């Protein structure tokens, strides 16, 4: 199909052209109206009780504390299966989630195995507004601290020997993600025009095929009548 044939087809099928333009305009408006999302990745470090032998709680590492952190997370997120990713750096915002949260131990084991090497929990929060992220962050951090204390109280741990948790200061920062509106609008326009033209070409192909089949049938009928 030449350019002029395509132009004639577009003019002939102007209702499709109009519908395509309207759909593209609506999609473009939705893209321009998107204000992006806010997210934070908060780290909560679990600390062993200090003693004369181990006065620095930050340097004390224990698999038992890692297990305890995992239990605390499980009590909050429930018994469901946790999705495993190839990297612990995967975030909800990167997965396309626009409103939600996740909590768990950083898993550095890769795609085929698990390895929980740090006694910390990672709280990933994403929401449409900064205020919503701040509200969830405060609420969930409070729940984590409460669950940690309650879990140890249920086991009869003396308060002086309790494992505690702190929030890593630099991880409470809230970030904003928003794409380039001009680029998104341009891509939407290109895709809308491409789909519209594709539909017109498909319909023209079917029309020409139907005409060819009809002409062929007439030709065969004439040959049969002459014979």
Image (cartoon, grey):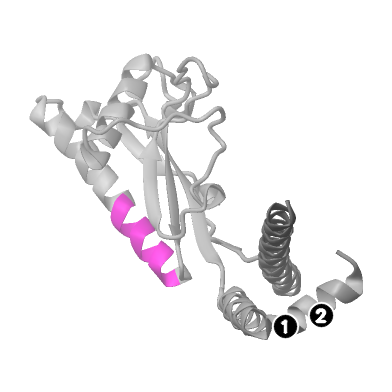
Mark 2, residues whose alpha carbon is within 10 Å: few (<14), some, or many (≥20)?
A: few
At x 27%, y 40%, the residue is 77
- List x then y, in percent, for residue 115: 47, 17
Can residue 131 be seen by looking at this rendering? yes
- List x then y, in percent, for residue 179: 67, 65
Q: Are marks 2 and 1 in contact (CB under 8 Å)?
A: yes
Which residue is disc 2 drawn over?
8
Which SS does the magenta portion mostly show?
A: helix
Mark 1, residues whose alpha carbon is within 10 Å: few (<14), some, or many (≥20)?
A: few
Tell which of 139 and 21 is nearer to you.
21
At x 37%, y 15%, the residue is 63
Q: Is residue 33 above or below residue 62?
A: below
Q: Residue furthest front?
A: 227
- List x then y, in percent, for residue 25: 63, 82
Q: Is residue 216 above or below residue 164?
A: below
Q: Looking at the image, how many numbered discs can be counted on the residues?
A: 2
Q: Which label number is shown at residue 53?
A: none
- List x then y, in percent, for residue 187: 73, 67
At x 53%, y 32%, the residue is 88
* Location of the N terminus (image quadrant): bottom right
User: Relative to residue 123, is residue 86 drawn left or right?
Assistant: right
Label 1 element class: helix
At x 52%, y 47%, the residue is 95
Q: Is residue 89 above or below residue 27?
A: above
Q: Is residue 137 magenta?
A: yes
Which residue is disc 1 drawn over?
12
Tell which of 218 and 91 is nearer to you.
218
Report the span colored magenta. 131-140
Q: Is residue 14 magenta?
A: no
Label 2 element class: helix
Tell which of 37 and 19 is nearer to you.
19
């Amino acid at each position: 199909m030449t350019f002029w044939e395509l132009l004639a087809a577009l003019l002939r099928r102007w209702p499709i052209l109009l519908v395509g333009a309207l759909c593209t305009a609506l999609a473009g408006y939705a893209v321009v109206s998107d204000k992006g999302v806010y997210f934070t990745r908060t780290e909560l470090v679990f600390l062993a009780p200090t003693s004369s032998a181990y006065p620095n709680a930050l340097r004390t590492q224990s698999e038992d504390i890692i297990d305890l952190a995992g239990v605390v997370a499980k009590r909050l997120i429930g018994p469901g299966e946790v999705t495993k990713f190839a990297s612990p750096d995967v975030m909800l915002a990167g997965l396309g989630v626009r409103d939600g949260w996740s909590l768990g131990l950083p898993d550095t084991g890769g795609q085929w195995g698990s390895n929980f090497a740090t006694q910390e929990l990672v709280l990933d929060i994403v929401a449409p507004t900064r205020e919503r992220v701040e509200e969830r962050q405060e609420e969930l951090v409070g729940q984590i601290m409460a669950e940690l204390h309650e879990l140890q109280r249920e086991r009869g741990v003396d308060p002086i020997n309790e494992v505690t948790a702190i929030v890593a200061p630099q991880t409470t920062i809230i970030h904003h993600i928003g794409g380039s509106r001009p680029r998104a609008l341009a891509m939407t326009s290109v895709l809308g025009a491409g789909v519209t033209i594709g539909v017109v070409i498909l319909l023209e192909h079917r029309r020409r095929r139907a005409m060819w089949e009809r002409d062929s049938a007439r030709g065969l009928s004439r040959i049969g009548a002459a014979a």
